[in-house]
Image (tube, grey):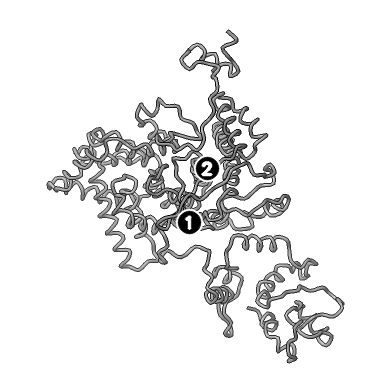
């Protein structure tokens, strides 16, 4: 902290007069102005009559620290600019207040600004704020450290915003430089966490979507989205538009119902297929905004204790919108934000896991280099979810341990322990899933030596003898995460453990036969949520492995493979279909002419 700021913090150096009730407001002056107008100043440093330059009025002396830094920024070529507080700073402070973050600056930001943590017995502002909140009993809404043992599905608010991650990569000025002026053009009804409203969107009006609390038991709260009559009519029109196979009909519907969620999801897919990624992402964000505005006041995104039943069609739109937004974020290069969305989806129904996010969370954790979270999830859920029986967890967890052992900021004994655990787990994975090794090496363009490729355990028979459901899981994992294994250090470590497994196989280790029997029993048929996940993932290798009874079904982007035990809150009214579904000729003409009817015969 500069000496000038210290002088201003210590009011007794300006004069020893007792502070009056008006002394809490004072004005910042330059040193030259203070020397010239020192005798003219009134009580508490107030400037009389507005003579001379106009200063910055503050009500809290601790604000002087931030304003001091602001004044340094305002000096251009030795002269101060006329403005007192730039709009970008004021809007930034408002943004932080809306985010609910009590901390005004992180410790690294304070050090970067040139302020030491302690000087002459003065503590930094962050610790003062923390002490004030602790004494008042107010808990921090910000993310807790991992060792505080928050719920494993706890969602951190600040990581739901991709700008937080992009700022870390490119800096705040590059990310927010062009956003603040545009955001003032239109006022939106509430602050949201999942997306930021855009001035280019239609003016928001409630589309008839709401949420109600069904019940609360055992510390969990069960919610459900609801459609009023107006929204139900829009939903019926949407289904008719989908059956017409004409995207323009959905566009017409959105002109009258601009925040109809399923229409936004379906049109987003159409834009994505036409390579209009920007429009596709914008439509998904608008759908999320519409649904977040309908949240129940008790619905909490971060706690991990709020549930939405996927069997209700009204809830599925929220699942799918979150999944599609997560996919866009991963492609955009924001894996940390995508991981938070993945945790959010998983927390909505962790037992059933309707979108099978457990097949994806490990990949996002590795991409985000959040190895501690992946290991913690595996340790806490392995006992009751058998995560080691999923090929993605069986290979990703030892990879996380190995990558942790390569970090240089950990003690030596922790590095050795992580390396040992990584080797143990990868050997178990290779023993349980031997058919994954050769495709992995092929993906990584690595040619194994003859002792590995010709061995009966890792040879071609290992991949062919796999049950179809297991082959699908392996194809999904390798198609998504194979590039994480391409580093030379990882390949050398993998080679060492492959040789260890071959020695155990040749020695007749009973664990090898036990794993073979387990493969034959566990992977007879994949459940419906895995098929739904494969369809949403659009990974060609996994889609090609889907069974024929799934591929022959009609799959809609707004509701892929709906549950067989769907809970309907309202029924679509019956309507006379103009074309008989059994009439092949009529279907052919309708595919050419969407407006074709049987009366035209």
- Side (left or right) of 451 relative to 328: left
Which label was assigned to residue 96? none
- Side (left or right) of 512 relative to 116: left
Location of residue 351 in the rendering, given as x and y in whole percent from the top left corner: 37, 48
Residue occupying image coordinates x 50% and y 46%: 224
Residue with the most extreme left position: 508
Q: As rendered, which of 224 and 141 lies closer to the eye? A: 224
Q: How crowded is mark 2: few (under 14 residues within 10 Å), some or many (20 or more)?
A: many
- Side (left or right) of 100 relative to 81: left
Instruction: Please identify the quadrant where the N terminus is shown.
Output: bottom right
Residue occupying image coordinates x 82% and y 73%: 54
Instruction: Please identify the quadrant where the C terminus is shown.
Output: top right
**Element on which disc 1 rests:** loop
Reading the image, the residue beneath label 2 is 321
Q: As rendered, which of 244 and 335 lies closer to the eye? A: 244
Reading the image, the residue beneath label 1 is 155
Task: Work out whether mark 1 precedes mark 2 in sequence or the reverse, and give the earlier one.
Answer: 1
Residue occupying image coordinates x 58% and y 44%: 285
Dividing the picture into quadrants, the one containing residue 595 is: top right
39 versus 180 height, above or below: below
Task: Find the distance from the CA under tag 1 to the CA under tag 2.
Answer: 17 Å
Whether the residues at callouts 1 and 2 have beta carbons within 8 Å, the answer is no
Residue with the most extreme top position: 601
Location of residue 293 in the rendering, given as x and y in whole percent from the top left corner: 60, 49
2 versus 185 height, above or below: below
Location of residue 425 in the rendering, given as x and y in whole percent from the top left corner: 27, 53
Q: As rendered, which of 145 and 482 lies closer to the eye? A: 145
Location of residue 242 in the rendering, given as x and y in whole percent from the top left corner: 55, 28
**Element on which disc 2 rests:** helix
Q: As rendered, which of 410 and 138 lies closer to the eye? A: 138
């Amino acid at each position: 902290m500069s000496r000038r700021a210290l002088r201003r913090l210590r009011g007794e150096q300006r004069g020893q007069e007792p502070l009056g009730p008006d002394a809490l407001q004072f004005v910042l002056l330059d040193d030259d102005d203070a020397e010239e107008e020192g005798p003219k100043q009134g009580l508490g440093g107030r400037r009389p009559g507005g003579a001379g330059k106009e200063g910055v009025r503050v009500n809290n002396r601790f604000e002087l620290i931030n304003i001091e830094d602001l004044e340094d920024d305002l000096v251009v070529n030795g002269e101060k600019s006329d403005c007192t507080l730039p709009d970008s700073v004021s809007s930034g402070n408002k943004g932080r207040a809306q985010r609910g973050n009590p901390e005004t600056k992180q410790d690294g930001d304070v050090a970067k600004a040139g302020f030491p943590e302690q000087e002459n017995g003065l503590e930094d502002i962050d610790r003062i704020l923390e002490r004030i909140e602790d004494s008042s009993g107010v808990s921090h809404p910000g993310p807790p450290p991992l060792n505080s043992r928050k719920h494993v599905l706890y969602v951190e608010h600040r990581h739901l915003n991709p700008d937080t991650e992009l700022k870390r990569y490119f800096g705040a000025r590059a990310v927010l430089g062009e956003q603040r002026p545009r955001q003032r053009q239109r006022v939106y009804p509430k602050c949201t966490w999942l997306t930021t409203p855009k001035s280019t969107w239609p003016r928001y009006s409630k589309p008839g979507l709401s949420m109600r609390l069904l019940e609360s038991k055992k510390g969990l709260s069960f919610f459900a989205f609801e459609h009023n009559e107006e929204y139900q009519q829009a939903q019926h029109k949407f289904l008719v538009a989908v059956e017409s196979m004409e995207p323009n009909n959905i566009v017409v519907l959105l002109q009258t119902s601009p925040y109809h969620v399923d229409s936004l999801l379906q049109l987003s897919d159409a834009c994505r297929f036409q390579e209009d990624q920007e429009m596709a992402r914008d439509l998904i964000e608008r759908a999320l905004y519409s649904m977040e505005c309908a949240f129940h006041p008790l619905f909490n995104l971060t706690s991990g204790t709020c549930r939405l039943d996927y069997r209700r069609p009204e809830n599925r739109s929220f699942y799918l919108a979150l999944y599609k937004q997560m996919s866009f974020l991963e492609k955009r290069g924001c894996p940390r934000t995508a991981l938070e969305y993945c945790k959010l989806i998983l927390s909505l129904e962790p037992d059933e896991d309707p979108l099978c996010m457990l097949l994806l969370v490990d990949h996002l954790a590795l991409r985000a280099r959040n190895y501690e979270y992946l290991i913690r999830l595996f340790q806490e859920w392995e006992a009751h979810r058998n995560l080691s029986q999923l090929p993605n967890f069986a290979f990703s967890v030892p990879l996380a341990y190995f990558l942790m052992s390569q970090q240089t900021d950990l003690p030596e004994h922790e590095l050795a322990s992580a390396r040992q655990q990584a080797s143990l787990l990868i050997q178990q994975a290779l023993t349980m899933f031997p058919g994954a090794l050769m495709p992995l090496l092929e993906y990584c363009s690595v040619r194994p030596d003859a002792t590995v490729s010709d061995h009966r355990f890792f040879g071609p028979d290992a991949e062919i003898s796999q049950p179809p459901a297991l082959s699908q899981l392996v194809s999904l994992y390798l198609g998504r995460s194979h590039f994480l294994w391409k580093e030379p250090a990882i390949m050398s470590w993998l080679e060492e453990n492959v040789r260890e497994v071959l020695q155990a196989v040749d020695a007749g280790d009973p664990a090898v036969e036990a794993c073979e029997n387990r493969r034959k029993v566990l992977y007879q048929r994949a459940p419906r949520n895995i098929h739904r996940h494969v369809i949403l993932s659009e990974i060609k290798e996994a889609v090609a492995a889907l069974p024929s009874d799934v591929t022959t079904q009609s799959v809609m982007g707004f509701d892929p493979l709906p549950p067989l035990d769907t809970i309907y809150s309202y029924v679509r009214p019956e309507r006379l279909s103009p074309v008989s579904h059994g009439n092949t000729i009529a279907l052919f003409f309708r595919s050419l002419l969407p407006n074709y009817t049987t009366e035209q015969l």
